[in-house]
Image: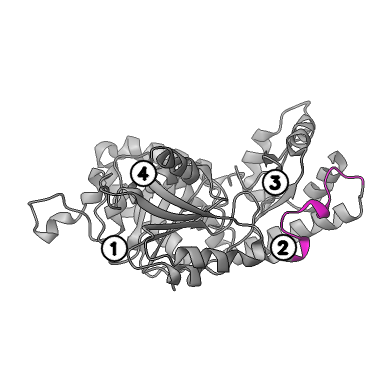
Amino acid sequence: MKRFYRRFLEVGAQPGVTPRLHFAAHSHHAWPDVTRDAQIQAWDDAARLADLKWDHIFGAVVPEAQGHIARILDLPDPKQIAFAPNTHEFVVRLLSCLPSDRRLRITTTDSEFLSFSRQMARLEEEGRIDIHRVSAEPFDTFAERFIAEAANADNDLVFLSQVFFNSGFIVRDLERIVAAAPERALVVIDGYHGFFAVPTSLRAVADRAFFLAGGYKYAQAGEGACFLAVPKGFTGRPLNTGWFAGFGSLAGGDFDRVGFSPDGFRMMGATFDPSGLYRFNAVARLFEGEGISVADIHARVKALQGVFLEGLEARPGAAVSAADLIVPADGLAGTGHFLTFRRADAGAIEERLAAKNVIVDHRGDRLRFGFGVYQDETDVAALFERL
């Protein structure tokens, strides 16, 4: 796969410096060369079309991106997909669909990313929400414990990740969790660490649950290409709204109040930089054209993780060991594309590896090693030399 990433890997190499080993593919993936061409195409289209570029974006670029996402996630209707520069924008817009005249009850986990958890903490400070956080650990009982809390009849919002960012654990019981939530509640799945990494079919929950993700991580498209899959028939009227959300609303004939698009566009905002969608489309076309599925990507990354763990077993003096894994090695089928080690010295290990130009990251006492399809066994071997 390296041949598709030649420019990114070459530009990242610095003369006279130990070659960079990027094992943080759960954060910033390398981008394939086609994304540079796509970035230039976005610029050229702006120059060629000027104000008319939006006709092209909404007539061609956006529908193509919707189609790729629907195909990858097995969603029945591409038009139910909206776009935004980041997932936090969607979090705020979803919250604005909920009643504003009373305290909200929210069920979530203790392992949500900051785009959601920080906003919840701030609302909690102000007494706006009553939030119930279900512990992700122990993982073997998570689903049952979360379902019991999600089923509370007073819930207004049920929000959880498909893959937890601080452990890599995959929640495999999404259908049961979604079904447990009361009808009044919005159900939202944060799929950022699963999209373009873990084979996923949302068809069974598409008419009930929202799914948000984006291009910055495993989709290898960089920033600015986030999306929200909206359940068909959803008629919420977000207070936080932009003029793009009104596309198609005039067909309803109601001119007495603010109109909304009848499809996923009702959750759109306003003017955004479309270049991220150009890049995402280029990546999706590349993999589809090469006949490489998300299942293939996942299998390749899991194989690399296996090589890494086998190497650790053979090197008891390495900086980390399989015994430090938060999700045990025998449960790797239930993890995403990074391995998380619980170490009190996680920050120090990250610093020492950075000094050897190895990029990993940590969150508190959790040290994360991410693997990408553009890596191979020689990269893992080089990592061991520096470990």
Label 3 and label 2: CA atoms lie apart by 14 Å
Q: Earlier in the sequence, mark 4 or mark 3?
A: 4
Q: First in sequence: mark 3 or mark 2?
A: 2
Packing grade of label 1 (10 A; few <14, some 14-19, many >=20) is: some
Tag 1 or tag 4, which sits nearer the N-term? 4
Q: Amino acid at mark 2?
A: Leu
Provide residue 252's location: percent of width, then percent of height.
Answer: 13, 60
Q: Nearer the viewer, residue 294 or 327?
A: 327
Q: Which mark is residue 368?
A: 3
Query: Is residue 109 among the parts visible in the rendering?
Result: yes
Q: Is residue 318 magenta?
A: yes
Q: CA distance from mark 4 to mark 3?
A: 34 Å
- Front one among 61 and 190: 190
Q: Does the magenta portion include 72?
A: no
Magenta part, dominant SS: loop
User: Is the C-beta separation of discs 4 and 3 under 8 Å?
Assistant: no
Left or right of residue 169, residue 263 in this image: left
Say few, some or many: other residues with alpha carbon within 10 Å of mark 2 (under 14 / 14 to 19 / 20 or more): some
Q: Secondary structure at mark 1?
A: loop
Q: Which residue is mark 4?
A: 128
Q: Residue at x 32, y 61 (%)?
A: 79
